[in-house]
Amino acid sequence: MKRFHFGALVLVLATTFVHAGQTCEQRSPDPKHVMQGFELAQQVKQALDQSKSELAIIARNGQDLTQYHLRYSHMGLVRKDADGRWMIVHELNQCGTAESALFKQGLANFFLDDPFRYEALVLIPSAELQQKILAKLDSDTIKQLHEAHYNMLAFPYSQRYQNSNQWALEVIAAALAQDTVIDTREQAQAWLKIAGYQATTLEIPMMTRLGARLFRANVAFDDHPMGRRMSGHIDTVTVDSVEQFLKKRDPQMQQWLITLPSSTADR
């Protein structure tokens, strides 16, 4: 049985509750779920170490999205720091509000956010793309491409709002673009259109949209084109759509699935 340092556990449990599109509930963490989160983080760390890579894209199964034919809810960019630790840079919604911020966290924190299933998708870009993304992470680009007004279902080609996966995609776009300097969201989105990025279309009926808008501060639809919105077609950036886009743009990219046995969290 793997052992974990008590001090690290206390640090994790004391961390401010911040979620990607979820509300914050002040409740004591389930020890079993905490250990599962640490276990998955350890497995991901071992896989990343063995890959000899410097950067990867990682996603988690934070919510049950099967009704939308989606598996992963949230992604971030993970890099190895000077001390050999794998740190994730990602955008997080602040407790179900309409605001977000950029965070740098360890692997364990990434999997302690009450996931639906203890499972990780790991994408290892080509060495060339890794270096390009690392260069963006070391620059002001990541802040310039961040929009604090959060919308879980943000339209991919509007600058009014942003969701967590959209921030990651726009940073990746800035890294992929050749002969073009991208330092604004408008530029990133224009390049993604030309590059053939295809958003995920969710079918969301009007009454469902109305209920979400009334009762959830982190969901809005006013950035979506009127025609698409009225017909119930909501286009947004998802992990699945980013994965498909990268498969076409970076044929050398490796893809791993890391999961714990019987990993669906108790509800």
Image: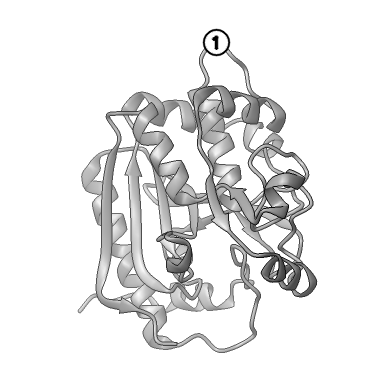
Closer-to-camera residue (24/228): 228
Say if 53 sits above or below 218 in the image. above
Q: Position of residue 140 (x, y in %)?
A: 66, 32
Q: Position of residue 21 (x, y in %)?
A: 62, 64
Does the rendering let one see residue 82? no
Q: Quadrant of the N terminus?
A: bottom left
Residue at 66% x, 61% y is 93
The quadrant where residue 5 appears: bottom left
Q: Residue 79, relative to residue 94: is it above or below? A: above
Q: Where does the image place residue 3, in percent across and percent down from the top left? A: 28, 76
Q: Nearer the viewer, residue 216 or 83?
A: 216
In the image, taking residue 264 as reference, residue 242 lies left or right, namely: right
Q: Residue at x 33, y 65 (%)?
A: 119
Q: What's the amino acid at mark 1?
A: Asp
At which x and y percent is residue 123? 34, 44
Mark 1 secondary-structure assignment: loop
Q: Which residue is mark 1?
A: 179
Relative vertical location of residue 236 with respect to residue 143 in this rendering, above or below = below
